[in-house]
């Protein structure tokens, strides 16, 4: 559930009308709801609260400083994939000690930066990466905490571009190579083995592959224990899907409870979750204005001021995102392709949508809080849209830490 709701004829973001936000900041504009972010984060955190755990929000889903700071204040951990993401987490008040660093090609300078900041763990994806981390740690005379990302070879049954846990994917270390890789890591002087992780894909709407992957990893953890390699945390990655259209995505409670159940009796093994989309997607909308209504020979077009450079998912994955009117009006409905100003036929936000609109009306693209602004570009030399955080009836753009401190003035500091 989110906090974007119709009140009378107007779409509201928490306590403020989306129309007012568009008038204040112009369009296209991303709008995020603090209350929704908090609700989603708590859904994960509460469901696993009986077990030792850490929810590490996947920063790649939405790295807006306001979003990160809302989560940091809850005491969230973070899953990052670059030095840039680490810098943003720190800027937003997140604690490096709660950061796990994923990604297949961490550079030596990123590793050095992360080590000196004291992150929780590197999620290592290959043997050469183990060597590289060991080299950098040795140069700094530090011990690097590491986890190996195991590719469990389970079919996540999602879009092929976002499936990551199959033998054919570039991610992680093959399940059958895992024991050897851990033995090798143990032999390297500046590595400290602390965990095991996996991530099988994104936008999964079935719990079975998650449970399957978890069981495979637990077997490996038991096998490693017989070789005196003790794993302290198991990181099951992210990937829980959301409802964009008519998918039946499991609730975070259901997902996290299924994970925690499999961990029963393993009190010394901390469970780490890395949800991104399930926290951020429905906490954001993209608001765009209809520039023109154009009647083509075969189709009607609603030409809007947001384009594939602002929201790439429909063009890249043929993804379906709900598009709705910001103000309900008594106008005849018609079917439109909602398209942007970019010079590409693939520049669309939605096709064949029933809408009651005319030029200058506003539209909201729903579920745009994850993989929206973060995948935006300046293609066609277009500016990127603004990002606005809504907190009750307050709304603001967050660009730097000082601003954050003013905004949250009087509130408690970051939770432990
Ligand atoms: C390693 C890792 N962790 C977490 C995530 C977050 O995934 P999602 O946004 O599907 O929860 C991803 C992205 O798919 C990822 O690659
Ligand atoms: N960018 C993807 C998700 C990628 C997940 C990252 N590993 C999306 O928009 O659905």
Image (cartoon, rainbow, N blue to C red):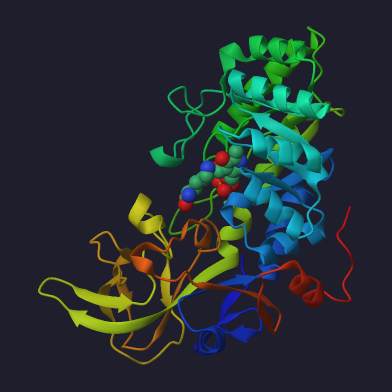
User: How many numbered discs sit on the rendered protein?
Assistant: 0
Q: Residue furthest left?
A: 297
**Residue at figure coordinates x 67%, y 63% from the top left:** 65
Above or below for 334 versus 163:
below
Can residue 205 be seen here? The reply is no
Can residue 320 be seen here? The reply is yes
Above or below for 228 versus 13:
above
**Between residues 155 and 162, which one lies in front from this camera angle?**
162
- Locate residue 306 relative to residue 174 in the image: left or right: left
Picture quadrant of residue 363 = bottom left
**Residue at figure coordinates x 61%, y 42% from the top left:** 81
**Residue at figure coordinates x 49%, y 72% from the top left:** 385
User: In the image, residue 411 lies at what x, y percent?
Assistant: 87, 72
User: In the image, residue 38 lies at what x, y percent?
Assistant: 72, 63
- Locate residue 50 relative to residue 388 in the image: left or right: right
User: In the image, residue 23 lies at what x, y percent?
Assistant: 52, 89
Q: Check the picture and name the quadrant holding the N terminus.
A: bottom right
Q: Residue furthest front?
A: 139
User: In the image, residue 287 lies at what x, y percent?
Assistant: 47, 76
**Residue at figure coordinates x 45%, y 87% from the top left:** 327
Picture quadrant of residue 131 = top right
Q: Residue furthest top?
A: 227
């Amino acid at each position: 559930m989110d906090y974007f709701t119709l009140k009378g004829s107007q779409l509201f973001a928490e306590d403020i009308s989306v129309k007012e936000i568009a008038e204040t900041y112009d369009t296209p504009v991303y709008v995020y709801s603090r209350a929704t972010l908090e609700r989603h984060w708590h859904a994960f955190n509460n469901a696993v609260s009986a077990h030792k755990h850490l929810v590490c929000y996947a920063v790649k889903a939405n790295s807006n400083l306001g979003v990160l700071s809302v989560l940091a204040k809850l005491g969230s951990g973070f899953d990052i994939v670059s030095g840039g993401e680490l810098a943003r987490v720190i800027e937003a008040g997140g604690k490096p000690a709660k950061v796990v660093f994923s990604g297949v090609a961490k550079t030596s300078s990123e590793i050095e930066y992360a080590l000196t900041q004291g992150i929780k763990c590197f999620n290592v994806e290959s043997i050469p990466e183990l060597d590289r981390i060991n080299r950098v740690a040795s140069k700094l005379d530090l011990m690097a905490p590491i986890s190996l990302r195991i590719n469990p070879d389970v079919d996540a049954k999602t879009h092929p571009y976002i499936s990551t846990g199959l033998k054919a994917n570039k991610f992680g270390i093959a399940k059958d190579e895992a024991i050897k890789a851990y033995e090798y890591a143990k032999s390297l002087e500046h590595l400290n083995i602390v965990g095991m992780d996996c991530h099988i894909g994104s936008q999964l709407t079935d719990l079975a592959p998650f449970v399957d992957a978890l069981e495979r990893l637990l077997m490996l953890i038991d096998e490693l224990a017989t070789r005196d390699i003790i794993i302290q945390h198991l990181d099951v990655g992210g990937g829980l899907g959301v409802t964009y259209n008519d998918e039946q995505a499991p609730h975070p409670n259901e997902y996290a409870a299924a994970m925690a159940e499999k961990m029963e009796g393993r009190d010394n093994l901390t469970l780490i979750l890395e949800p991104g989309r399930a926290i951020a997607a429905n906490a954001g909308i993209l608001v765009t204005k209809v520039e023109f209504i154009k009647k083509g020979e075969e189709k009607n077009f609603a030409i809007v001021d947001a384009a594939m450079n602002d929201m790439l998912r429909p063009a890249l994955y043929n993804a379906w995102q709900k598009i709705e009117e910001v103000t309900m009006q008594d106008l005849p409905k018609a079917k439109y392709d909602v398209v942007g100003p970019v010079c590409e036929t693939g520049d669309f936000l939605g096709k064949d949508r029933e809408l009651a609109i005319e030029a200058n009306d506003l539209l909201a693209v729903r579920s745009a809080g994850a993989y929206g602004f973060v995948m935006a570009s300046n293609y066609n030399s277009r500016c990127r849209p603004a990002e606005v955080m809504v907190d009750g009836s307050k709304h603001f753009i967050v660009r730097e830490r000082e601003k954050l401190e003013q905004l949250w003035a009087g509130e408690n500091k970051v939770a432990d």
